[in-house]
Image (tube, grey):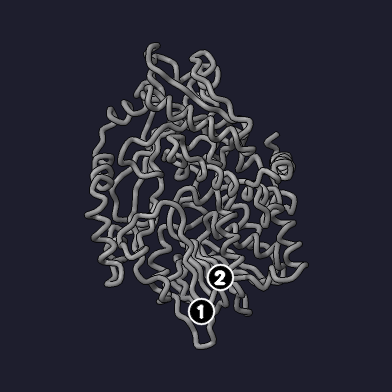
Amino acid sequence: MIRTPVRPDTVYPQTPPDVLLIGSGIMSATLGAMLKLLDPALRIELYEAADDYAQEASNGWNNAGTGHAGICELSYTPDRGADGEVDVAKAIEIFHQFESSKQFWATLVKAGVIEDPSGFIQPVPHISFVYGQDQVDFLRSRYEQMSRHHFFADMTYTEDRDEIRRWAPLLLEGRDPGEPIAATRMDAGTDVNFGALAGQAVRWLGRQPGCLATPGHRVEGLTRRGDGRWDVTIRSVSTGQRIVRHAGFVFIGAGGGSLPLLQKSGIPEAKGFGGFPVGGRWLICDRPDVVAQHRAKVYGMSPGSAPTMAVPHLDLRVIDGQEVLLFGPFGGWTTRFLHKTGRRTDLLRSVRPDNLLSLVRVGLGNLPLVRYLIQQGLQRMSSRIAELRHFYPDARPEDWRLLDAGIRVQAIKKEDGDAGIVHFGTEVVTDAHRTVSALLGASPGASVSTHIILQVVRQCFADRLATPDGRARMASIVPGFDEDLADPALADRQRELDRAAQAILRLI
């Protein structure tokens, strides 16, 4: 893995930036690369507090890396409609958004931003697996609804044990032969190392004319100037030197650190927001003989009060060239907002008069979730292995170890007059002047980062898209950006774009 050393002798450009990016994860990396491709004249600066890029939520060991496309994630299809059938609208939405990501990543490869796509993306089949008659009935209904849509026309469903054994042998080893089971599979799934992707994009950005990207610099303050621009106070972690950069637009893509910076901005749109941090852990196996038997990502059903991001899955991961199996994630109670650079006082420091009521209501209204996180944090290794054995009945404890993963800060806000709602997904907060945007939230954020960043570009850089030349340039960056590829009439167009992107990414 390429690391970027902290540079104590950073030379800051004399000309203030048009755009200042806070954080080096997949969101800032996506916005920076997209804007520079859209308008090469833009001056863009990126500052990262850690000693290297994409070390928090985007890092391969902290992120499930599934390439969420709605294919196997049962949490995106949890509800049955009035007719008793599973509602698949969310899965269709997520698939569509992931298509935009693949198109953009293919453009990054063509433009030389990414030199070798195999460094961040691999083809890995996506499987949904269930056990017990109720779950089997659910999955059958889900398949029937999904396979009618052209996005999922290639999905396969089976209750045949021999077929499932061919797909993923570990699922059947030691399983009760009388237990009802079922699975769906699509071969067009992916494994994505978002940290590797973000790191390559940020390093490319830092080499472009008029741009700067540097780790080891913590943003400490945001103040709006009289002319509408922003004074951004930044401290060098290695030297302690403080500088102030004047920027026309600021993007707060600092993961769990976004909420405190959003609050410091003082914009009215930040009022009422709070954060609910959720810790995570993985069970990891790197024994070659075990890994060789599981060449897929397998998702199951959520265990009751578990948050969306904690739906169990047994994944093949390729991280910096190393193949491993990950199972989890296991949740945990935490008061920190960042895994590596967070503080125990992060949650307390985020409390404001305008969000206190929301936070209290979250605590009272989500007691099952709070109990779940505390219970998860107190689990013994034997309990975690017992959960793994629902997927891999013959799992041996000595083959697995526990690894702390990243922290997700779920956004809490007032909505429709009701306070204290935990929002799963990603919340984009933009001020009325379109001069600052912040991202709050979690899964499936990384996978649909292109879709999310396109919202920011449409809102805050609308002038770049207002001309025929600007729209044509964006269409060359994300070919389907202005098309509803979920429309059955565009099924052939969707397949054409998907084949082109997959060929460039070397997935076919």
Instruction: From this view, report whether residue 389 is shown above or below residue 497.
Output: above
Numbered tag placed on residue 2 in the rendering: none
Amino acid type of the residue tagged 1 in the rendering: Trp
Instruction: From this view, report whether residue 285 is shown above or below residue 229.
Output: above
Where residue 211 appears, as percent x and y from the top left, is 64, 68
Cα–Cα gap, marks 1 and 2: 9 Å
Between 322 and 294, the one nearer to me in the picture: 294
| Residue that label 1 marks | 230
| Residue that label 2 marks | 20
Q: Neighbour class for label 2 at 10 Å: few (<14), some, many (≥20)?
A: many
Which residue is located at x 74 percent, y 62 percent?
Answer: 473
Does residue 431 appear in this view? Answer: yes
Instruction: For the C terminus, give its image quadrant.
Output: top right
Classify mark 1: helix, strand or loop.
strand
Does residue 239 appear in this view? Answer: no
Q: Earlier in the sequence, mark 1 or mark 2?
A: 2
Amino acid type of the residue tagged 2 in the rendering: Leu
Where residue 446 appears, as percent x and y from the top left, is 52, 50
In the figure, is residue 168 to the left or right of 205? Answer: left
